[in-house]
Amino acid sequence: MNNVNSQEAGAESDLELAVRLAGEAGRQLMEMRAHALREDVGPTELKNSGDALSQAFLGRELSMLRPADMVLSEEALDDASRTTSPRVWIIDPLDGTREFSEGRHDWAVHVALWCAGRLEVGAVALPGLGLVLNSGTEAPKRMPLEGPLRLAVSRSRASELVKALAERLDAVLVPMGSAGYKVGAVVRGDVDAYVHSGGQYEWDSAAPVAVAGGYGLHVSRIDGSELAYNQQDPYLPDLLVCRPELAATLLAHIAQIHQAAEPHMSGLNKDGMYAR
């Protein structure tokens, strides 16, 4: 990914800004949660407070430091005119509110920049691990595949599509929390692929996809088509992130599974994709 800097020479670059904002938002959320858990704050209040805190911080910083840019966020009203802007920050202030409220580590903060038709930079903070993954990191050398394929799946239940894939490929399902954390698990090598078909929005995947692409991973929709961002409707229902050598195999099996599925089959949503 290119590191676009709309500011004068010597100023904080877009990538540096994304990394700093994601990391600082994560730090503030960790502090808030520690205090709230000591005070026995309920999970609903903690979720809402976390969303509000991170949104306020990210929105304020972006407004001050990139005033000409627009922002698409899960936690703010959408301005339809953003689709005419050449630069749009796509953020998820707290990805994985359930995990955050339960004191778990598998949640994330997403900060990405879409510029002139593509994702340019992205940062995914994993505060529970003390990490900020970013799109500017040189892709590491990956170890050869060994043992069964590992697929990241939802903690609540694996989608019918992923269960079918696992059966075909003798894969192991690895439950974990937020979308950003799942993509981060592929980036870090804890799993080999993340296949999602249950419905998402641009803020769920923009920063993780930018990071995964920067690390040399395959990213696409589950039919192999490109992921498009800063669309009028930010709904982006499905996602495949995997080691590049697995992409052709996974896409072929996904296509075969969809071809075999009856249209009326329980679990298919309005897009014809398997619901979570």
Image (cartoon, rainbow, N blue to C red):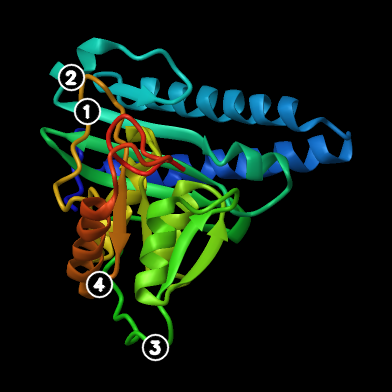
**Lower position in the chain sequence, tag 1 or tag 2:** 2
At mark 2, the secondary structure is: helix
Q: Quadrant of residue 66?
A: top left
At mark 4, the secondary structure is: helix
Task: Give the number of the mark in front: 2 or 3.
Answer: 3
Which amino acid, by three-letter code, is at mark 4?
Leu
Up/down of 142 relative to 15, above or below: below
Whether label 1 touches label 2, CB < 8 Å = yes
**Lower position in the chain sequence, tag 1 or tag 4:** 1
Q: CA distance from mark 2 to mark 3?
A: 44 Å
Badge 4 density bin: few <14, some 14–19, many ≥20, Cα 10 Å = some
Residue labelled with disc 1: 230
Residue 144 point in image, percent of width and height: 32, 87
Q: CA distance from mark 1 to mark 2?
A: 6 Å
The answer to whether one can see residue 187 in this image is no
Badge 1 density bin: few <14, some 14–19, many ≥20, Cα 10 Å = many
Residue extending farthest right:
39
Residue sitting at x 11%, y 33%? 116
Badge 3 density bin: few <14, some 14–19, many ≥20, Cα 10 Å = few
Residue sitting at x 50%, y 66%? 173
**Residue 192: mark in rendering:** none
**Residue 83: mark in rendering:** 2
Residue 249 point in image, percent of width and height: 21, 70
Q: CA distance from mark 3 to mark 1?
A: 38 Å
Residue labelled with disc 4: 246
